[in-house]
Amino acid sequence: MTRRSFSLLGGLVALALASATPAAAHSQSYGYLQVEAGGANTGGRLELAVRDLDLVHGLDGNGDGSITWGEIRLRESEIASAMLAGVAVSRGGACQMAPSPVMVDSHGGETYLVVPFALTCPQSRGDVSVGYDLMFDRDAQHRGLVAVAFDGGSQSAVMSPENRSAVMAERSAGALSNFVEFTRHGAHHIWIGYDHILFLITLLLATVLQTRGLGLRPGLVQATKVVTAFTAAHSLTLALAATGLVSIPAQITESLIALTIALAAANNIWPVISARVWVMALAFGLVHGLGFANVLGELGLSDANLLVSLTAFNVGVEIGQLAIVAVALPALQAIAAPRIGYRAMPVSNAVIVAIGLAWFSDRALGTGLMPF
Amino acid sequence: MRIQKFLAAAFLGASIASGAMAEPTRPSDDGLVLAKVAATGAPQSMELRAMQAELAKDPNDVDLADALARTAIGLGRNAADPRYYGQAEAALAPWWATADAPTEVRVLRATINQAFHRFADATTDLDAVLAADPANAQARFSRAFIRLVTGEINDAAADCAVLTMPGADVVRAICEARVAALTGKGAEAASRLLQAMVTGRKGNAAIKRFGLTVIADIWTGLDQPETAERYYLQVLAFGDADAAVVAAYADVLLTQGRAAGALQLLEDKGEADILLLRRAIAAKQTGDVRLAGWSGILAERFAAAAASGNRVHLREEARFQLEVIGDAKAALPLAAANWESQKEPADGELLLKAALATGNAAAAKPVAGHVARTGLTDRRVTNLLRKVAQMDSAS
């Protein structure tokens, strides 16, 4: 290709016309990079306009002026790799980006090719660095719109030829919302944790049986002692496990929890520990705390807000627990008060023993006896 | 623009991250058309592709980069498509930030900068070129046009007056006619330009088209749509009209209440913002069901442009808010920001309309000040200023 020669007037008019006409944005060239950096599943998607990809890859295979899905699909992996090669994500080191099959969507009336990807980074916490170098050598007005979503909100940046990388500071959730969130998690866990509820009810049953006919006050005092002991114990082991000071495999703790239910119910039938139910609550509570820690671990904790999250989770557990006590204690007292209810107690406890043992065999031996 | 920045950040944060946009899908039909591009054989764009491939081998070939940039600018102008200007800029990348770039590069750089409303950068280059070579007609003409856009009417006139190189009489007539149109001497200037085109250098279709477009624009400014239409039709008769000409003609039809005609004109003319905006306005006036689709596309584009810090779209966005969405309160700050960078009559008209619609007479002050300072004489701007004054005294 030789240089085109321009007559003075031809060139003049061409440029003057260009000057007279503001570019007024047909639609500018954009790339979109979204990264999900919160929670356990990290990934994202990268999008470029089909028209821009055509500029780099020459996608109109048959030269008819229409780029079809078929023409792209045939070269899908080549295009997707080239796109991903133009971006980099790192978090404590370079992250691996594994593409899924490409898709399409539209922005501003133009079709974009979407490359979804899974992201594996050396670290799951901390700031995320993003590098973006797509299209700039072909279109200096191309802009990469980058957004990184963290637990506590997202960070965004605009990439240009002069600015091809950005560090997105991790946005952890604000202290208050973090507290509320973990409190909710704690309460929720108690509510859906049938094993914890059943254990709590079994403990309450013990106090009900012990204080039957002694009036409201002794019943309440006993229940308070037991719940307090349970709370103190599981708070201690929860803290030990969450900080990593104690580490016991989940299968063992979950199995032991099932066993505590069976043992507590058995104690209601053949009292071994009669006067000091709170001692049993304390001892078995240590095991339940390890169970809570497993849940907390799944939620993901950062060192920075460990103490806050832990406290909040505990507060949530207590709120859930008190709600259960408020409903269950009067109900159990009402059931145990009449002679017939009292007579049925060994049977009820035997059922609880059976449930506890079934859970134990499920969890320890994988027998699959229980539906939940 | 703090508000714009905030909105941009909010858009990026909320919209992109939350995936508020359409969910991606995987098509099942291989025949689905995803994009229309120039077919093989479309001469100019194939030429551009070939030059881009060639330049990739030797990015420092200044002559090739120069030719590529010119071709891209021509395509960008024709389609009102900023992507071509971006490609021109990319071709000039090795010299883009150098102060002592070759003269040709500096002139092209100015053209590209102007297209993206970086008027100060453009002027810096042109000033330097003209300081070294006052007879550089390209630089002179380009600077005159920038000054017309930024409202420095007297300075523009000074540039036009020294376009005395041989063979440039029609070009000077065009330049002077545009200045005259802003100072109340449009009618005479239009006939003088027509005269110059008849007696001047014959055979250059591009100059003839340009001259006719300027004449049509002048009659539009004089509020004589029938006369303007006659000239726009002559320009369109050349075929392959620039998007800006189509948009200007569509505006003439819209001011005459001929929205259906505007829709017909804009059919198959491409998806440029300036055309899509007129389509949406026409669709709104005719109750066309396609309004929602077009206005959705425009809204997405304006949001993305704002998020990326691009301010080129302000004129269109303000008009979109005012005439399509009907939200004068949203239009006013956009029109005011646009007025800070561009001061053509259309920009003043937009700000005045937004000021009137919001009952905010103070917002019109910059336009009144500009008129007083430069002697800008435009029938529509004058009428609107009168209305603002009436509104102000009535309140």
Image (cartoon, coloured by chain):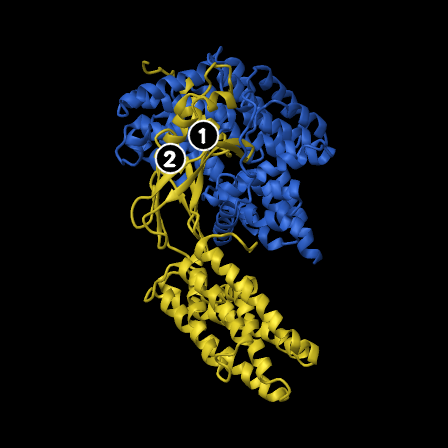
Q: Indicate the position of residue A203 as horizontal and vertical percent values.
A: 54, 75
Q: Which residue is mark 2?
A: A84
Please rate how many residues cluster around mark 1, counting C-alpha atoms within 10 Å: few if below 14, some from 14 to 19, many from 20.
many
Q: Indicate the position of residue A302 as horizontal and vertical percent values.
A: 38, 60
For residue B180, above or below residue A207: above
Can residue A15 be seen here? The reply is no
In the picture, the quarter occupied by the C terminus of chain B is: bottom right
Chain identifier, blue in the render: B
Q: Amino acid at mark 1?
A: Arg
Q: Is residue A253 left or right of residue B346?
A: left
> Between marks 1 and 2, how big is the CA–CA gap?
22 Å
Q: Indicate the position of residue A149 as horizontal and vertical percent values.
A: 45, 50
Q: Which residue is mark 1?
A: B83
Q: Residue at x 67, y 27 (%)?
A: B262
Q: Amino acid at mark 2?
A: Leu
Q: Secondary structure at mark 2?
A: helix
Numbered disc 1: what chain? Answer: B
Q: Residue at x 27, y 35 (%)?
A: B98
Q: Is residue A302 left or right of residue A70?
A: left
